[in-house]
Amino acid sequence: MRVGLYPGTFDPVTNGHLDIIGRAVKLVDKLVIGVAVNSGKGPLFSLEERVAILEQETAHLTKFAQIEVRPFESLLMHFAREVNAQMIVRGLRAVADFEYEFQMTAMNQQLDREIETVFLMADPRHQAIASRLVKEIAALGGDIGKFVPAGVAQQLLAKVGKA
């Protein structure tokens, strides 16, 4: 069974994330979406909320591959081994992403050469989307409908007191 791991904070999950997930499920038999605890980033949504939102927003993709949404707090490569992933899926938006991801991939290869990293370029419609910016736009009363699914938009607007 080909198992891929798509890790992230997903605070909140965006259309860009969902685009990468939708394309990743075509490459694997099972995709584990690893939701990082990452308290250092001060997530707006709780870990439980982020997991539940991802389960809901990816349910329609289970016709392509098995999907499992799991929280993790460990080193990524330890989590990848735990879920028996042969590949880590990463989305790239811009050159700045590439520089960071290139460095992370090099370090991850030193930790485990058996796990490959696969990069998927963001769809041009989603290249500018970043969860951090979506939260800021929502907090300032802007329209986030182009950046996140409708259900996520409602939950985000409620979180920032704009619903």
Image: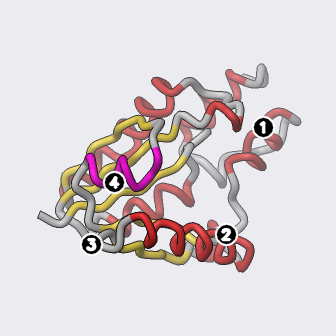
**Residue at horizontal 81 percent and vertical 43 percent from the top:** 137
Magenta span: 75-82
Please give the residue where the numbered disc 4 appears in the rendered image. 80
Is residue 28 found left or right of 77 in the rendered image? left
Give the Cα separation between the discs numbered 4 and 1.
33 Å
Whether residues under marks 2 and 1 lie with C-beta atoms below 8 angstroms apart, the answer is no
Q: Residues within 10 Å of mark 2 (few under 14, many from 20)?
A: few
Front residue of this view, candidates 85 and 33: 85
Give the Cα separation between the discs numbered 4 and 3.
17 Å
Residue 77's tag is: none
Mark 3 is on which residue type? Leu
Q: Earlier in the sequence, mark 4 or mark 3?
A: 3
Give the Cα separation between the discs numbered 2 and 1.
27 Å
Q: Earlier in the sequence, mark 4 or mark 1?
A: 4
Q: Earlier in the sequence, mark 2 or mark 1?
A: 2
Mark 2 is on which residue type? Tyr
Which image quarter is the C terminus in?
top right
Whether residues under marks 4 and 3 lie with C-beta atoms below 8 angstroms apart, the answer is no
* Foreground disc of the pair 1, 3: 3
Please give the residue where the numbered disc 1 appears in the rendered image. 138
Mark 1 is on which residue type? Ala
Please give the residue where the numbered disc 2 appears in the rendered image. 100
- The x, y position of residue 75, in whole percent, is 47, 47
**Mark 1 element type:** helix
